[in-house]
Image (cartoon, rainbow, N blue to C red):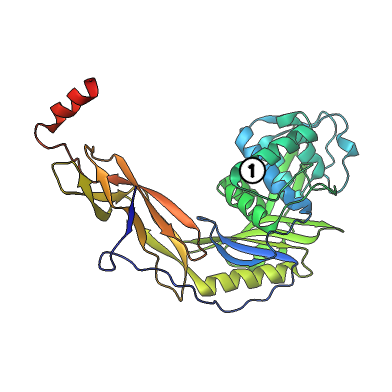
Amino acid sequence: MAFRALPLSLLLFPAIASAQAPVTVRAASAIVVDAETGAVLYSKNADLKRPPASCTKIMTALLLQENTLPSDPITAPPGTKKVGGSRLNLAPGETLTAAEMLDALMIKSANDVAHAIATKIAGGDAGFARLMNRRAKELGCRNTNFCNPHGLPNPNHYTTAADLATIARAAIRYPEIAGASTADVRVLNRRGGTATTVLKNRNPWITKTDGAIGLKTGWTTAAGHCFVGAARRGEMAIVTVVLKSPDWVGDTARLVDWAYENFESRLVATKGEKVAEVKVQGGDSPSVALVASRDVRIVVPLSQPTPEWLLPEAVTAPIAKNQTVATGRLTLFDGTSWEVGLYAGEAVALPHGAAGLDRMRQDK
């Protein structure tokens, strides 16, 4: 199917690349992406494989949300006390809900909780790691291999800043994950309500940055200080990743401020409103209105015009009203494409008499 770009008089014109104001970060690897489209606003060694430490738990949280209900019970398996590093000190046989496990995973960064989740969902760390890697590939990660649910050191356990941003974009679509990672305090009622554990969020970035959303800190000797964060200001949401940073709070704050100083979210289509008209082949009307199936926002550099729509040259009758008949494409400033389904604003029938002839041809 041939495509055409909308004329300047109808909508928009092509984006032209231009340099943004520079930003300096000390992290070995870093990236900033638009949370909606994944467009890359900033990148530094973003495809270089590195150990992610506890930032691994973002994938664990995602799989927890995708495979359990908040009220589902999760019981600590035998051997839980052997899991090292940061812990909730679960006792073997102790049971918490999936929602409580999520709080402990994201706020306490509890490795024993990650192990309990892995055992609940996949029978253990090895089986869960296979699920993690499969999900990573489904999301489009290219340089990731997880060996465990918590991020404790393993030479074959690695990912990249770019892949972590991809995983984080999927994770923050769940308000439970965003809420747990941003919450100041959560309380766990343990052992039948006879004891409680207060989880205090000690992530300093959350309180220092306007619009901050979690997401997860991490540290090991090999990984250094790592942080995957998100932020929303107005209609624009971004995801940031810094790996092996000597100043992860400062690096993240600089990236966030830089992004909002140089980019903005623009509404390029409103759900239910006409985007354009295209020709109709073989119909009783020469054209049909294309209507957006949803609101479409993209992030655009302040210094650039909004990109134009790329649309099909024509669609073929018959067409029912509200039938999805085309895909509109936008080429974003980083060269990637963003596609949106467009539907017909009105019905277009075959010319009088052509419908019967068409049915006769199909019967043959």
Asked whether residue 258 is in view, the answer is: yes
Against 130, is 359 above or below? above
Q: Residue at x 40, y 50 (%)?
A: 340
Relative image position of residue 209 (x, y in whole percent) = 62, 67
Relative image position of residue 348 (x, y in whole percent) = 18, 40
Relative image position of residue 301 (x, y in whole percent) = 48, 71
Relative image position of residue 314 (x, y in whole percent) = 26, 49
Give the quarter of the figure containing the C terminus. Answer: top left
Against 75, is 102 above or below? below
Q: Residue at x 61, y 36 (%)?
A: 66
| Dot 1 crowding, Cα within 10 Å, few <14, some 14–19, many 20+ | some
Query: What residue type is disc 1 on?
Result: Lys
Say which of 285 and 52 sits in front: 285
- Residue extending furthest right? 82
On the image, numbered disc 1 is attached to which residue?
137
- Residue extending furthest top? 363
- Residue extending furthest left? 352
